[in-house]
Amino acid sequence: MRVAIIGLGASGTAITTELLNDEQFGENNRLDIFEPRERLGAGLPYEPEDERVLINTSPGALSMDKRNKQAFTDWLNTHISSDKDFSHWFAPRDYYGRYLNDHIQPYLADERVHVIKQRVKDMQILNQDGEVVYNQSHLNHPYYALQTTDNTWHQPYDAVFLAIGHPPYRDPYHLREVENYIHHPAPLKENLAHLNAEEAIGIIGSGLTGLDIIRYLNHHYTFEQPVTFYIRTEPFTTVIQPELEEEKPHSLTREWQAEQLETYGGIIPLQIIFEQIKADFKAHDITYDYILENCGSGSIEQIRHQVNEADPQMQAFQKYISGLYPEMSALINVLPTSDRQEFFTHYSKQIIHFLNIMPKETLELVIHLLDQGQLRIVSGLTDIEKTDQQFTLTANNDTYTADVLINATGFENRLSVAKEQDDFIKTLYEKGIIMADEVGGIKVTWPYTQLISSRYGQLDHVYTLGTWILATQFPNNAVSSNVRQARRIVHHFLDTYEE
């Protein structure tokens, strides 16, 4: 058995860990890992970075050890501080990268593992005779070949795991190649290290990346002009609330799902799911209309309210949502096709709004900077043009200028657009090996997230996970969801593999 993992970030680390810990992956098998970065195990989000850049998940949800859910917390206690309470603290991304690197080292020492420090640029599908196949569905036991950037072909592989991280950043105003536009801000300590304190600095977008940027700029610079968030609607999401000790369990269990699937012939209508959630809200005294009215927009007024006092309703709501999170992908993938489209059109942004909780301390800083006139927020952004040496931004029929713009608009989920910033993805797309999901990202099966190809049909034992498959593995904006999916797909491969 010969297996390839493309990418050794957090997802690739989870796959490696699960594969090598399974007795079915015997001592005569081989694992090739393709990763050119110096810090192995971490990937782009957790590369060496300024300590102002935080991961917005508590350490207890970030363990790579299924036997010890506090493994990252234990690492922090050993390497950072032995007398600090890390339970409700957001760690710097650099710390998590260091933890991942430490975690992966014993696995990389395994004789079955071969790290190839090259990027993969192409892929071919082979038949059992090792011949390249260009158009054929339902291949019996296909093999796979991978070409690296040094033009070497590596083959044959029985399975390929695409752990390739997240899509590129959006470029909604077509500024990617424009001077003084910082399209890809990370790592901040490199890409934002040479700003001029006399310049007018603008940040496009105010999500979690935008907050990282504000923390960094506030620590390293004192600007003569206020830094400005330029946004289309309201600026923020929701503030993490003090966690309740009391559980707020959901009733959409695997048993409940099985009953509904039998009742509705293999699907669960969106309305039935909503009715069950409403019943849970009633049982937990959660008033969703109150949540929407007081926390649903992310306005400065709502953020001030959430920062200044603990909200019992929001505490209960966040506790409930965190428990429901692991079931969301399963629920999305049993919706009728029309309901799935309706969900992503009308409801997914609202769900993500409530899942992308923001650190209280950072939003306290934002409010302080706003009140001191060191930060401003301009909403209603519609257009940006580069004129002479400055940018001209139009918002609500007013114009503003900036010397430097920093992109914090999030990731591009449209495959037809995203491929232009990723050569490997573009090659797979143009060859018909991957195809676009109708609501965004790459189309895969569920629950084992194997690629669906326009030329080959389902590609057996070619798996992917993460933000590239947001429309299937929803809402995969947490390490924990990728760790769970890594376990699922590794065991699927090992259980279905036939020599």
Image (spheres, rainbow, N blue to C red):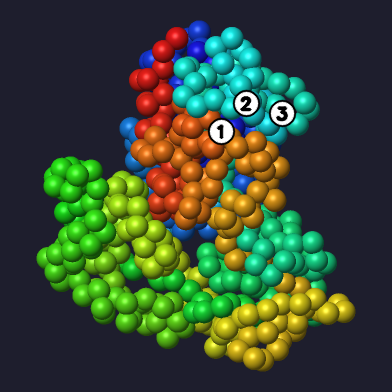
Residue with the mark numbered 3: 148
Q: Is residue 64 above or below residue 87?
A: above
Dividing the image into 4 quarters, which one contains the C terminus? top left
Please report whichever mark, 3 or 2, sits nearer to the chain's N-terminal start. Answer: 2
Q: Residue at x 65, y 33 (%)?
A: 35
Question: Can residue 115 be seen at all in this image of the molecule?
Answer: no
Q: Residues within 10 Å of mark 1 (few under 14, many from 20)?
A: some
Asked whether 439 or 9 is in front, the reply is 439
In space, the residues marked 3 and 2 are separated at their CA atoms by 20 Å
Residue type indicated by callout 2: Tyr
Q: Secondary structure at mark 3?
A: strand
Residue with the mark numbered 1: 455
Residue 268 percent location from the top left of the image: 23, 51
Which residue is at the far right?
A: 388
Please report whichever mark, 2 or 1, sits nearer to the chain's N-terminal start. Answer: 2
Q: Is residue 36 above or below residue 318?
A: above
In space, the residues marked 2 and 1 are separated at their CA atoms by 8 Å
Whether residue 161 sits left or right of residue 84 in the image: it is: right
Residue with the mark numbered 2: 134
Asked whether 82 or 251 is in front, the reply is 251
Disc nearest the viewer among 1 and 3: 1
Whether residue 447 sits left or right of residue 438 in the image: it is: left
Q: Quadrant of residue 153?
A: top right
Residue type indicated by callout 1: Arg
